[in-house]
Amino acid sequence: MSFPWAKEYQPASPLTKWVDERLPLPRLIYNALGAGYPVPRNLNYFWNFGILAGLCLVLQIVTGVVMAMHYAANTAVAFDTVEMTVRDVNWGWMMRYAHANGASAFFVVIYLHIFRGFYYGSYKAPREMVWLLGVVIFLLMMATAFMGYVLPWGQMSFWGAKVITGLFGAIPFVGEPLQQWLLGGFAPDNAALNRFFSLHYLLPFVIAGVVILHIWALHIPGSSNPTGVEVKTESDTVPFYPYFVAKDGWAVGLFAVLFSIMLFYFPNQLGHPDNYIPANPMSTPAHIVPEWYFWPFYAILRAFTSDFFFISAKLMGVMAMFGAILVWFFLPWLDKSPVRSSNYRPLYRKFFWFGLVPTMLVLFYCGGAPAAEPYVMLSQLAALYYFAHFLIVIPIVSAIEKPLPLPYSITESVLGNDEGAQLRPGHGATEAVHADAAVNPPLQGA
């Protein structure tokens, strides 16, 4: 969005002026992450997860490139090369554990980022493209993480690959040829490991490209905010630098502390013990389970236990598992409420906190539990509500709900109903009153 009050970029030296005239990269950074990008003054800490997701992506790319220098995509030595990296390469243990735990940190941040979007209606117009690209990023992350989990070639890596790729066999007519094409054979072996390694190395750079599109799409309408009210005047915004750079910096510092505690004191806490046993096609683990960030969708997959006429339970589970993410693509059109933020939607807020959130927690728990009762029944109930929430609850609630009154402006939501602090109806968009500047500087609202 072009804000008339945004500061123009002024090169600070002859060198930066020369560079800017020939390659306007400094201007691009200034307008995207500096004082040239005004943001709503009322953003809370849920808006820090975007920068944390970018930090996690950089961490994964850097540690992944280092790990690739010592990895051999061969089933005879893959497991040993990973162990050699941990034991014999200088700082190899830190690279390996930072990469493994970085994947978990990435998904923690992304799940919170997505649920912030659910709650504050970040998928609504005019930000549909921002949301759609975000869902594409999540799907690419899932694919990248799955192929990365196979690379250590431990027991859980091998059997996880066999189970997940076996799901494609449930697709009528083309399932088995598709499965063999993905694996390069009839079972996970050298061909599959080479393919997964190549794609696992490539996809993070594809994700980085989509992230650039995601940020570009975001800068066209501007950032959303907790009220869901669009920016009207200059007093509604503050420059991204220095206010939100400092706020993001605090979040990055906290993230670094928590991640370091995990990395140095609990590096194997989220790993499965069976994956420290070399892959053995002749020995099936007692309980095959994917990484924790796949658990909700794995629970939905296992919730289907009986065939329905000519449709097998396996096929229905596969369709439901992918549908659980694909339904997010249609969310901007399923939710027809004129109000974005759930802070002003009392009925939807109840369904969110007492419906969707507990459902996801149940799916997380059941996805990591054995495929036995009562976990299967809980998965079925949770999966039923999950789809009902998006396909039934949201459309109906958005049609019948009576939202609470919205503040006239972002400034009003921050400073209260102060005639001298915001633009009132009847004034032009460029006739903002700035009487609050002396008493209430922008930092107070940030």
Image: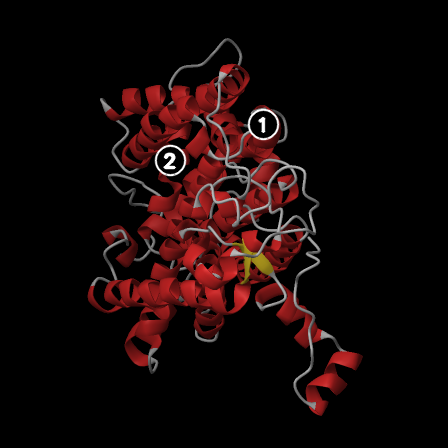
Q: Position of residue 31 (x, y in %)?
A: 65, 66
Q: Position of residue 323 (x, y in %)?
A: 52, 29
The correct choice, above or below, for 192 with respect to 286 in the image is below
| Residue 225 visible within the image | no
Amino acid type of the residue tagged 1 in the rendering: Pro
| Frontmost residue, 139 versus 2 | 2
Query: Mark 2 = which residue?
Result: 296
- Given the current orientation, which residue lies at the most extreme left position? 265
Residue 33 position by quadrant: bottom right
Counting residues from the N terminus, which is met first, the one under dot 2 or under dot 1? 2
* Residue drawn at x 66%, y 40% as measured from the top left: 126
* Residue drawn at x 70%, y 52% as measured from the top left: 430
Q: Position of residue 297 (x, y in %)?
A: 41, 34
Query: Mark 1 = which residue?
Result: 338
Q: Which mark is residue 415?
A: none
Q: Helix or strand or loop: what does disc 1 sit on?
A: loop
Residue 5 position by quadrant: bottom right
Way the structure is coloured:
secondary structure
Asked whether the residues under the numbered discs 2 and 1 touch, taking CB atoms below 8 Å apart as contact, a structural biologist would say no
Q: Position of residue 231 (x, y in %)?
A: 60, 47
Whole-angstrom CA distance, mark 2 to mark 1, is 30 Å
| Frontmost residue, 55 versus 267 | 55
* Residue drawn at x 43%, y 58% as measured from the top left: 151
Nearer the observer: mark 2 or 1; the answer is: 1
| Residue 403 visible within the image | yes
Amino acid type of the residue tagged 2 in the rendering: Pro
Q: In the image, 73: left or right of 133?
A: left
